[in-house]
Amino acid sequence: MQHAKWIRFIAQFSQLSRRQRQAGIARLRGNTPQDATVALLESVAQPHLACPACHSSHAHRHGRAHGLQRYRCVPCGRTFNALTGTPLARLRHKSLWLAYADCLLASASVRQAARQLNVHRNTAFRWRHRFLTLARTDRPHCLHGIAEADELYLLESEKGSRHLARPARRRGGHARQRGISSEQVCIVVARDRTGQTLDFVTGKGALTKVQLHACLPPVIDKDVLLLTDGHAAYRAFAREAGISHQAVNLHAGIRVQGAAHVQNVNAYHSRLRGWLRIFHGVASRYLPNYLGWRWILDAGRIRSPEALLKATVGTFPHLTVT
């Protein structure tokens, strides 16, 4: 290479991302990004490797395919690899997966990620929901002490559907009915004072006590103090469930009564709404994935693409979840 070309070449190094620099160093050492991804995934799967069909751990090596070690189960004869039965099974371009995990942690849109990785936008969209399938399930098991609960409503969206059950709205549009109606999807968010957060898509229309009974009892302690606004559904639910409840009269302008407030959960609502605006509308059927994605970012439990890739196949950070 001519000296002038070399100078122009190395001048571009400052524009590389951290992931691109790591890939360049790996390439100079004779490795490829796919090697690093495969090694990470196989190291995660090795301790609990078992046949997905019969769950036997008695297997032997059976060649390699698509960069992955294959195994043959001795009892049933089926073959499998480290990704069989995971959301990443049969996906291609393994060398780009860590870079894509970086895009998720940066809240990149589908088109931004597609441009950055030089893949089709449909591939970036498919990867988004495959990566989030298991990662979104890493949630607290229970809320303790003082827990706040409140609901928010998002306009129901059939974005991406080929057949709509209603007239199409241009660029999201607005609800045809005023107030809370079946055109809106209800999301209940419960959050304790340690920051542990759970959310539930309860369905269309106004929140009911039946919906609260379906989602909250398994995830809150019996001795919890539940703080909410004055919605009648919370009062009825707390009375029937036998838990302590205190309502904050927001309509009267009373937002804080000593330690009784719902400021934490309302702040979470605000962060969630602001973050969702990046995507210019989210299809209602994918809301659980986006809520799990938001929890990943808000909780800060997953901070590196390697940790996110591990969570994608069901191996979560070694941090105690209450």
Image (cartoon, helix red, strand yellow):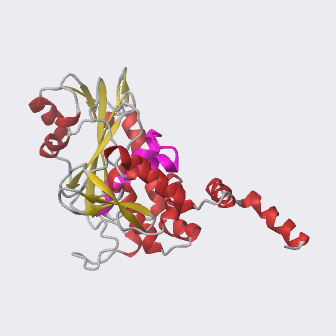
Q: Name the side, left or right, on which 245 lies relative to 101.
A: left
Does the rendering let one see residue 229? yes
**Residue 222 drawn above or below residue 11:** above
Residue at the left extreme of this rendering: 240
Q: Name the side, left or right, on which 242 lies relative to 197.
A: left
The N terminus is located in which quarter? bottom right
User: In this orientation, which residue lies closer to the viewer: 242 or 292?
Assistant: 292
**Residue 145 drawn above or below residue 42:** above
Horizontal and vertical percent position of residue 103: 52, 58
**Residue 134 drawn above or below residue 166:** above
> Total marks drawn?
0
Does the rendering let one see residue 274? no
User: In this orientation, which residue lies closer to the viewer: 89 or 162?
Assistant: 89
Q: Residue at x 29, y 79 (%)?
A: 162
Horizontal and vertical percent position of residue 47: 35, 43
Q: Main secondary structure of the magenta part?
A: helix
The C terminus is located in which quarter? top left
Tell me the quarter of the picture where residue 263 sits: top left
User: In this orientation, which residue lies closer to the viewer: 133 or 60?
Assistant: 60
Q: Is residue 140 magenta?
A: no
User: In this orientation, which residue lies closer to the viewer: 59 or 222?
Assistant: 59
Range covered by the magenta-colored residues: 284-308
Q: Residue at x 28, y 68 (%)?
A: 176
Q: Is residue 304 magenta?
A: yes
Tell me the quarter of the picture where residue 19 sits: bottom right
Horizontal and vertical percent position of residue 297: 46, 46
Horizontal and vertical percent position of residue 146: 30, 25
